[in-house]
Each structure stands twice: as C-alpha cells, then as structure tokens.
Image (spheres, helix red, strand yellow):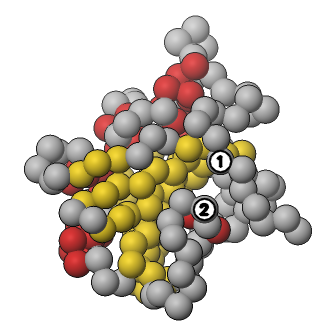
Amino acid sequence: MDNHLIWQPRLPENISLSPPQAAVMQAQSLTAALRGLNAGFSVRLLHLGSSGFDRLFSDGLQNNTAQNWFARDVLLCLDGEPVVWARSLCRQTSANWLGLLDCGTRPLGERLFDGSLPLTRSPFEYTALPPHYPLAGFDGHASVARRSLFDWQGETLGLAECFLPALQSFVQPADE
C-alpha cells in the first residue's frame, strides 16, 4: 500500500464539497467555525503523550526517527458526534508546546487564536486521504485533511485536521 500523501495548497478537486463545507475546511480557526454552526461543540481527548512520528507530517516536519515526539489526538464533536479528528505533534523537548497541549478537553484553538501568543502559521495544505486511512484512537474514516505548522520562538507544532463524514450533516447549503 502506498502511504505517501500528496499535499497541495487548495482543497482537492476530486472531492465533492458544498460551499459551506469548503468554508469550514478553510477557516483559520476550525474551533471558531465549528462553534458557529447550529450545534453543541465539544472536544473528546483520545491521547496525550509520547508518540511515534506521523505520516501526516512526513514532509512537513523534519523527520528525525531518533527524536521522541509528543502528540495530542482529539475528536472535535458537534452534538456529541465526531466531525473532525485532529493531531497536534511537537518534539518532546518543546517546552512551550508541551504546556499548551496539556489542556484536557478545552479546544487548542482557543489559545492558538486568542492573540496572546507570538505565533506564526504556515499556509494550509490539503490532501485527499485514501480509504481506511488510520486515525489514532478512532476507528472511523476521513476523506479530506488539512495541515499547517505553527512556530513559537523557534519551536514547531504540526497540526493536522481530518474531516469526518458526519460533518456534512451539520454543514448544509443554505437552500437545503
């Protein structure tokens, strides 16, 4: 099986998305976009701690297999239904990020976008995920993912967000 993902600066053209779905997938703060929908927003923590390197970041972060990584895996839910699986990944030695990631079921987006941190963010990259792409701690599947990198005083955090099929039922075109 080919595990290589092809990342691009725009949403994949071979994926059929409504304009409202595309707008959510391109929102700077996914937390804010999901909270803006007519549904109860919550975060379900799947994993916080040591992790192996992830293929979602294979060409985005420097892949040093000898380096230990730290990950936070969550499900972003609407009305209790998972709509996004997200992974935040940094080096075990990233003191800034380790403290920020240990936020329980609070959304990471609250801190990333509250204006209090001296962060820079890379542009989004998107990919179409192959069928049955494994998502740690979750047995569902996603078809589209986005990723970006945050820099905080020379330390990098990779953030990947995989959009689950249930999102479609919460994001409908205005005429439906």
**In the image shown, does 35 or 13 lie closer to the viewer?**
13
User: Mark 2 and mark 1: span between their CA atoms?
Assistant: 9 Å
Q: Position of residue 48 (x, y in %)?
A: 39, 78
User: What's the residue type where badge 2 is placed?
Assistant: Asp
- Relative to residue 53, is residue 17 drawn left or right? right
- Circle 1 — which element? loop
- Relative to residue 30, is residue 98 drawn left or right? left
Of marks 2 and 1, the one in the foreground: 2
Are the residues at dot 2 and dot 1 in contact (C-beta closer than 8 Å)?
A: yes
Residue farthest along the right direction in this orientation: 1
Q: Residue at x 37, y 36 (%)?
A: 28
Above or below residue 95? Residue 45 is above
Q: Residue at x 65, y 47 (%)?
A: 7
Q: Position of residue 77 (x, y in %)?
A: 45, 51
Q: Which mark is residue 7?
A: 1
Crowding at dot 1, Cα within 10 Å, few <14 / some 14-19 / many 20+, comes out as: many
Residue labelled with disc 2: 59
Residue farthest along the bottom direction in this orientation: 66
Is residue 33 visible from the viewing direction of this image?
yes
Above or below residue 165? Residue 43 is below
Q: Position of residue 153 (x, y in %)?
A: 21, 63
**In the image shown, does 120 or 79 lie closer to the viewer?**
120
Q: Residue at x 53, y 12 (%)?
A: 174
Is residue 107 visible from the viewing direction of this image?
no
Q: Residue at x 85, y 65 (%)?
A: 2
Q: Position of residue 171 (x, y in %)?
A: 53, 29
Q: How many marks can you see? A: 2
**Quadrant occupied by the C terminus:** top right
In primary-sequence order, the first of circles 2 and 1 is 1
User: What's the residue type where badge 1 is placed?
Assistant: Trp
- Relative to residue 13, is residue 112 drawn left or right? left
